[in-house]
Image (cartoon, grey):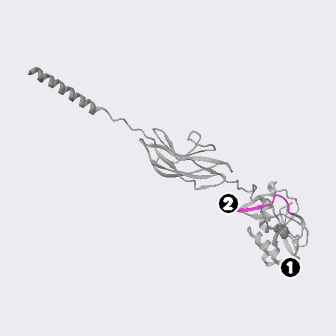
Amino acid sequence: MLKTYSKLSFLALILIFSCKKSTDTPTPEVKETPKVETTDISVFTNSTADCGGNVLSIGSSALTDRGICWDTTSTPTIAKNKKSAGTTTGVFSVQLTNLNSLTKYYVRAYATNSVGTTYGVEKSITTKELIAIGEKYAGGLIFYLDASNNHGLVCAEADQGTFNKWGCASKNIPGALGIEIGKGQANTTAILSNCSDVYTGADVCKKLVLNGYNDWFLPSINELELIYLNIHKKGKGGFTETTYWSSTQTAINSTFAQTVHFYGGNTQSGGKDNPTYVRAVRAF
């Protein structure tokens, strides 16, 4: 009887020890990287792009970085180009800068913790053509940009006429008195509506088809002055150092129209019958 009891006690001890050992074994730690998604690219220009992502979870440890990585080849990683955007979950955005114009870029959101880095789905963009004063764009050379930097005026890269008259010297054209930036087109329309003379500055510009565009016009006096300052003075445009017509009639004397001398930049009035050079412009 004693031997039976001893055997039972021994078995009980083994069972207790086995249970204790099983209970004391630690649960293996689950190691997870963050979860992140790439959001749509909202705005991009010739050199910038607004990109973003959304960190859905941090994974098994604290987030140490998040942001956007990009490259000109597919599947970009943080090893090359990246821009950080903090260490919290949720939606974030960054602006990529100093990109090359007319270039395709691949972008991915990323999130990093102590386990590793996770990437969102790849998206791509192609940056726009360079828009800057003096650059070739929209059929000509940019000489004016508005506040948005997306719209402006270009002049043709060569003269359209040499020694063309302004036209209708004896006729007053009240609609051609605009001097400001943006008035050249209205001035040109007024001239052509009220003056039937052909081969005039306005007529030559209106009939011009150049680089796929047919909406050219004679610049206002302020537009012509900008062409002198922003194009000719920078050695571009191949201008002759002579006088060029504007579409602005002289208000005090309807037999004159305003001109700019491209050898000095000064503005003066010239008789509408005086043969003068013509350079067409268009808006974009």
Task: Judge the density around disc 2: few (<14), some (14-19), many (≥20) Cα neighbours within 10 Å.
Answer: few
Would you name the residue on which mark 1 appears?
Answer: 171
Q: Quadrant of the C terminus?
A: bottom right
Direction from residue 10 to residue 191 in the image, left or right:
right
- x 50%, y 45%: residue: 66
Q: Is residue 99 visible?
A: no
Label drawn at residue 150: 2
| Residue 152, quarter of picture | bottom right
Say which of 36 and 270 sits in front.
36
What x and y, as percent, mark residue 186?
76, 72
Q: Which residues are magenta?
A: 149-160
- Magenta highlight: main SS: loop
**Circle 1: residue type:** Lys
Judge the density around disc 1: few (<14), some (14-19), many (≥20) Cα neighbours within 10 Å.
few
Residue 246, position as x, y percentages in the image: 82, 68
The foreground one among 70 and 178 is 70
Residue 90 seen anywhere in this rendered image of the structure: yes
Question: Is residue 133 depicted above or below 180 in this figure?
Answer: above
Q: Quadrant of residue 133?
A: bottom right
The answer to if 155 sits in the magenta stretch is: yes
Distance CA(mark 1)–CA(mark 2): 38 Å
Q: Is residue 32 left or right of residue 138?
A: left
Determine the secondary structure under disc 1. loop
Name the amino acid type tagged 2: Asn
Is 140 magenta? The answer is: no
Q: Residue furthest left?
A: 1
Specify the quadrant of the image occupied by residue 74.
top right
Q: Disc 2 on helix, strand or loop?
A: loop
